[in-house]
Structure formats: C-alpha cells, structure tokens
Amino acid sequence: MSISRHIERFHELPIHEFAPDDTRPRPAADSVAWRLALAYRSEQDFAQLWQSFLQDVDPASVRALVIGPWWNGAEGYGSVGPVIEALTAEAGRLPALEALFLAEVTYDECEVSWLVMDDVTPLLAAFPALKSLAVRGGTDLGLDPVRHDALTSLRFESGGLPATVVRAVAASELPALERLDLWLGVDEYGGDATMDDLAPFLDGSRLPELRHLGLSNSEFQDEIAAALAHAPIVARLESLDLSKGVLTDEGATALLEGQPLTHLNSLDLHHHYLSDAMQERLSEALPGVGLDLDEAEGDDPDDEDDRYVSVSE
C-alpha cells in the first residue's frame, strides 16, 4: 500500500466519496466503502460532514468507512480526536460497520509525520463487530491493550510508530486476527520500538489465527529478519512483509540460512539494499514464493549512512 495515491478499494469494496451536494443517485449503503474527506478551504467542518452523511446514507447498512482529511485548512492540521469522538458517539447507528480506515491521507495532502493522531482504543471498544482497522499516522497515536473478538486485520502505517502502541498490540487479546501490519518508522519521528517490543509477535504463543505478518519500514530491518529466521510464528504464516526498510545482504542471508520459507505464498522485500547477487540467490531459493524485490536502492557499504526507510516524514 502506498501513501502517494488514494486507495481504490477497501474491505473488498470500491471506494465511493460522499458529497453532500451530489444530486446523482447514491449507491446502496452496503455496496461501497464510503470515503469522508474535507476539501481544502471547505466551508464545512468534519462534524457537519458526518451529520450530513448520517442523514443522507442509511448508516445501519454501512459496512466500511474511509476517513480522509478531516481539516479544512482554516486552522492548520487539527487532531483526529474529534473525528474519533464523532464516530464513537454514533456507533449504535452503525451496527454493520466491519472496516474502518482512519486517516487515508496522501503525502500531497499532508506529510504522514504531520498527521496529528489520538488514542484509537475507543474505536475498538465502540465497534465490537469491526473486522478491519487501518490507521495512518504516528504523532500522538495511542492504544491501550484491548480484547476484540472480531478483528481479523490490524494495520498501523507510520513514519514513526510509538513503542507504546506496539506494546499495546502485543498485550491485546485478538483471537481472530489474521493480518497484522506495523510500519515501524524511525526514531526521529517517534518510532522508538525495539526488538524486545517485537518479541511477543514472534514466539507463536499469541495471535493464534495470524497468517500474515508485516514488520516493515524499519531502520533495523536486518535484526528483524534475523529474528524471524528462527521465529516459531513463521511456520504458520502465508505471507511475510519486510519491505520499505533498510534490509541488506546481512538480513537476507539470515533469512535464507534460517528455517524454510518455501511455504510462503508471498515475501515482500520491496525497497531494499540487497546486492544483485543476493537478489538472484533469493529468487533461486524461493522459486514458488511470490517475491517482491522492487525498488532496489543499491548495496554500497560506503553509503550506509545514506540508507533510509521508505516512509518517514
């Protein structure tokens, strides 16, 4: 998933942008993922847009929501907190909601590090039937350990994911979770998680239904790869995402010399610092695996200080 362009589908539904003044026939409420976003210099605020949506679309049938820019530019980039409050206040009117993407904002609209987030725990508490939650942005992001029995997909996209959020995910009871993606980011933008924080995801004792694991966009991607080479969780994964980070031949060697990876359907390593020889070695060792080696950034050891993750500022 890229932050350079808007998604076209979410929760296997086409995106449809809600516009209060659109006089054309609207699609059935349950047939699309509704995107709510304020245009720059809009005369509305998000609360007004939200109330228009609840009035014009049958909220009881809505299955998926995508929240774009929630500010109109009049007072800069405001916190997403009021959006969370607006959604949770009307949770009873959205009994069919299965998927929520909070802050589906491209870098043209706002740099990911400028997105001012808030505690997203109330969303999980308010929507017990939610199956998919995606959150973009790390500044002021919060999460408390929770139990949620329905959630199957959890995704945090960030240029700097706070360690407190990583620990909260690790401490949560998510018995149905099948997909977990954490864009860890860099310390400069609040990404202060360590390997110790990631350890609970690797030993296989938690998240019994997990089939996809993404630990990506990291400055210590080699260490993550080395840990996964012997991590019990890998044996029951169908896909693994180590993309967008500073992965070098050292980390790739550890992967190949560890446990077998041939059972994976896909291994995403795009945006990497692997040599041509290592890329060829990976392709030869994993012929049946969907291997993504796009965005090779070069492997010159003298350029070590110039290596960067894909998403930071």
Image (tube, grey):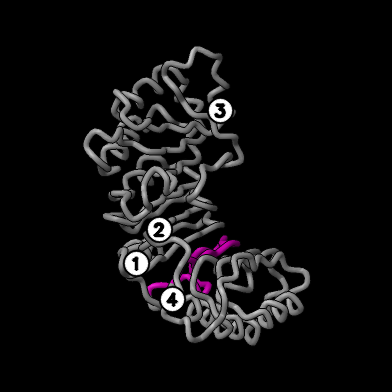
Q: Residue at x 34, y 59 (%)?
A: 145
* Residue shown at the point (67%, 79%) measured from the top left: 276
Q: Are marks 1 and 4 in contact (CB under 8 Å)?
A: no
Q: Magenta stretch?
A: 197-218
- The residue indicated by pointer 1 is 191
- Residue 244, percent across and down? 51, 65
Q: Residue lying furthest top in this view?
A: 23
Q: Which residue is mark 2?
A: 158
User: Is 209 a magenta residue?
Assistant: yes
Name which residue type carries label 2: Ser
Q: Secondary structure at mark 3?
A: loop
Task: For label 1, count other residues whose C-alpha is less than 10 Å away and answer few (under 14), some (14-19) or many (20+).
Answer: many
User: Which of the two marks, 3 or 4, is nearer to us in this view?
Assistant: 4
Residue located 50% across and 63% down the image = 207
User: Could you tell me how far apart the alpha carbons at marks 4 and 2 are, in whole angstroms?
Assistant: 20 Å
Q: Distance between the Cα atoms at labels 1 and 2?
A: 8 Å
Q: Nearer the viewer, mark 4 or mark 2?
A: 4
Q: Could you say where residue 80 lies in the image, as x and y percent from the top left?
A: 30, 43
Quadrant hosting residue 193: bottom left
Q: Amino acid at mark 4?
A: Asp
In the rendered structure, which amino acid carries the disc numbered 3?
Answer: Asp
* Front label number (1 vs 4): 4
Residue 120 visible at all: yes
SS state under label 4:
helix
At horizontal 59% and vertical 36% (from top left) the residue drawn is: 13
Going from N to C along the chain, the mark reached first, 1 or 2, is 2
**Do the numbered discs 1 and 2 sit on residues whose CB atoms are within 8 Å?**
yes
Nearest to viewer (mark 1 / mark 3): 1
Is 92 in the magenta? no
Mark number displayed over residue 30: 3
Q: Is residue 158 above or below residue 117?
A: below
